[in-house]
Image (tube, rainbow, N blue to C red):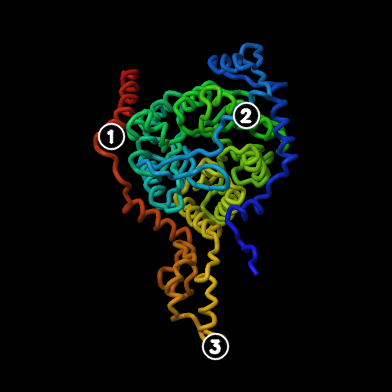
């Protein structure tokens, strides 16, 4: 008699475990978001965006207050892709963003670094950007790279270009870049085009994407809109994330804060599809956040809104931008480990697709390479847990059990030698005998992670860019630097 497999696939297990909200509740949140767009409207601080929406059927008042009818949102959903593909620097498919596929990477632009060598909290410098990119390329469970640190030892007008150049030179993995202004986004794309072999090649196999922060859901700032339209036209993936803080820039309730954010997401989706049908739009898997009213800090690891945004992304059938591996702790300590594990597991079970902020401490203000190594180890654990269990004849090993019988053991059996490596073996998590651990120095996890980070930074090098391409990338950065120097003269 044939029986149904106990485990059909990891995706099926995820769908049972992710805590999705019922479809009728998701639809209620969607309809509330549509009502805000059509009844309240949003301000768009870019005339081109206002004109596009007006011509498509939206109403405009007070110069730039736009009310968007629901039919435009539904039209946008019909053309928005359900899956976004990103490639590595060499043109190989690296990430299929959609469904319940999860990929993991760092965050960007931390104002402080918790130095893994000294333990000091300090401002990052240019070398920290290089070391973080090099470590990200080396760690096996980091799938995409963002520039973890904002270097304080250079002019802020050049930092985003420098970060992009560093990432292009130090990793072959997909890159998610952030820029200070619209011109920075254009320069980042120009550098990526130099690597890809032109605009057409980059559009066909994009290995870079852009993280766009929007002022609020109902105040769409000029530079965010410029980036959205520019990237949409070029088929370059981007996340579009209106920033809302429950109790400050949005209602304090999770649902109220979410729909104030989501109205802005839907507005961005409409604009992206008006600019170019099929533009690769990635919806935020965070939203509904609220300030901690005791401290006025915006927490990164709070549980309140986590299931909501991921569930809505899947309700919409859009790729989802997640946020995990982060902590509100000030140190890579027990709290940081717990919050990293909880948030990573939550986003993986919920099916967030592009999960960023691994290695963040201090509510996004500080980055730690020790924390990043911890997150890499946790993701390895999660991925092994999600691997489908083999149920073929060799795995079931009925004949082996019968041959060994009730009185034997499997220590020296050929079956053990053939399959023991299929089990999970951690790199940093300690599970040796106490005496062996002690003989190797009795190191804490943090000490082991710091040593690993140092070793990988010193030893690992990614495949270098060809000399002429590296020079073309640097020429973009040099051009901006020349302009800064000329204006200062």
The residue at the point 68 percent across, 41 percent down is 294
Above or below, comparing residue 116 to residue 90 in the picture: below
* Quarter of the C terminus within the rendering: top left
Q: Is residue 88 above or below residue 438?
A: above
Q: Tell me, for residue 207, which label it has, or none.
A: none
Mark 1–mark 2 contact, CB under 8 Å? no
Mark 3 neighbour class, 10 Å CA radius: few under 14, some 14 to 19, many 20 or more: few
Q: Position of residue 55 (x, y in %)?
A: 59, 14
Which badge, 1 or 2, is on the more N-terminal residue? 2
- Asked whether, in this view, residue 24 is left or right of residue 403, the answer is right
Q: Secondary structure at mark 1?
A: helix
The residue wearing badge 1 is 469
Residue 56: x, y in percent?
Answer: 61, 17
Considering only vertical position in the picture, is 174 above or below 449? above
SS label for mark 2: helix
Tell me how many marks there are. 3
Q: Find disc 3 in the rendering and name its residue.
A: 407
- Residue found at x 53% / y 26%: 277
Residue that appears at 50% across and 22% down: 226
Give the quarter of the image for residue 265: top right
Residue 295, visible in the rendered structure: no
Q: CA distance from mark 3 to mark 1?
A: 66 Å
**In this rendering, position of residue 442 left or right of residue 487:** right
Query: Which residue was labeled with disc 2?
Result: 266
Residue 1 drawn at (x, y percent)? 65, 69
* Disc 3 from disc 2: Cα separation: 65 Å
Pick out the residue farthest to the bottom: 407
Where does the image place residue 167, in percent across and percent down from the top left? Answer: 38, 39
Q: CA distance from mark 1 to mark 2?
A: 38 Å
Residue 175 in which image quadrant: top left
Tell us which disc is closer to us: 3 or 1: 3
The kind of secondary structure element at disc 3 is loop
């Amino acid at each position: 008699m044939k029986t149904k497999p106990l485990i059909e696939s990891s995706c099926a297990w995820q769908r049972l475990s992710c805590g999705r909200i019922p479809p009728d509740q998701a639809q209620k949140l969607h309809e509330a978001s549509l009502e805000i767009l059509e009844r309240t409207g949003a301000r768009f601080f870019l005339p081109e965006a206002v004109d596009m929406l007006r011509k498509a059927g939206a109403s405009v008042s007070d110069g730039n207050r736009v009310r968007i009818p629901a039919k435009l949102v539904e039209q946008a959903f019909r053309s928005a892709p359900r899956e976004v593909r990103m490639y590595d620097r060499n043109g190989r498919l690296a990430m299929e963003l959609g469904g319940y596929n999860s990929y993991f990477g760092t965050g960007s632009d931390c104002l402080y670094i918790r130095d893994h060598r000294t333990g000091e909290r300090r401002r990052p410098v240019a070398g920290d950007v290089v070391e973080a990119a090099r470590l990200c390329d080396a760690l096996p469970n980091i799938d995409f790279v963002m520039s973890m640190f904002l270097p304080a030892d250079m002019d802020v007008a050049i930092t985003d270009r420098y970060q992009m150049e560093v990432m292009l030179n130090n990793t072959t993995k997909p890159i998610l870049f952030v820029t200070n202004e619209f011109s920075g986004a254009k320069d980042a794309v120009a550098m990526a085009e130099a690597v890809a072999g032109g605009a057409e090649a980059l559009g066909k196999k994009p290995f870079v994407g852009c993280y766009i922060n929007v002022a609020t859901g109902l105040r769409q700032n000029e530079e965010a809109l410029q980036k959205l339209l520019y990237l949409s036209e070029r088929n370059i993936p981007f996340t579009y994330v209106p920033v809302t803080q429950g109790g400050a820039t949005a209602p304090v309730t999770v649902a109220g804060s979410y729909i104030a954010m989501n109205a802005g997401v839907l507005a961005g989706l409409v604009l992206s599809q008006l600019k170019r049908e099929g533009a690769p739009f990635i919806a935020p898997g965070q939203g509904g956040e609220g300030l901690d009213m005791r401290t006025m800090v915006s927490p990164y690891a709070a549980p309140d809104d986590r299931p909501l945004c991921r569930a809505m992304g899947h309700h919409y059938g859009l790729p989802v931008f997640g946020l995990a591996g982060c902590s509100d702790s000030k140190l890579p300590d027990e709290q940081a480990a717990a919050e990293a594990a909880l948030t990573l597991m939550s986003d993986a079970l919920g099916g967030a697709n592009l999960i960023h902020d691994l290695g963040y401490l201090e509510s996004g203000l500080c980055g730690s390479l020790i924390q990043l190594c911890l997150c890499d180890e946790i993701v390895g654990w999660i991925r092994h847990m999600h691997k489908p269990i083999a149920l073929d004849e060799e795995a079931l090993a009925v004949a082996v059990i019968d041959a060994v019988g009730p009185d034997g053991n499997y220590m020296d059996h050929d079956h053990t030698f053939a399959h023991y490596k299929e089990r999970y073996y951690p790199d940093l998590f300690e599970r040796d005998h106490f005496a062996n651990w002690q003989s190797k120095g009795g190191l804490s996890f943090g000490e082991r992670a710091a040593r690993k980070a140092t070793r990988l930074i010193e030893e690992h090098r990614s495949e270098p860019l060809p000399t002429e391409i590296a020079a073309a990338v640097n020429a973009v950065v040099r051009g901006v630097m020349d302009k800064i120097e000329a204006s200062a003269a």
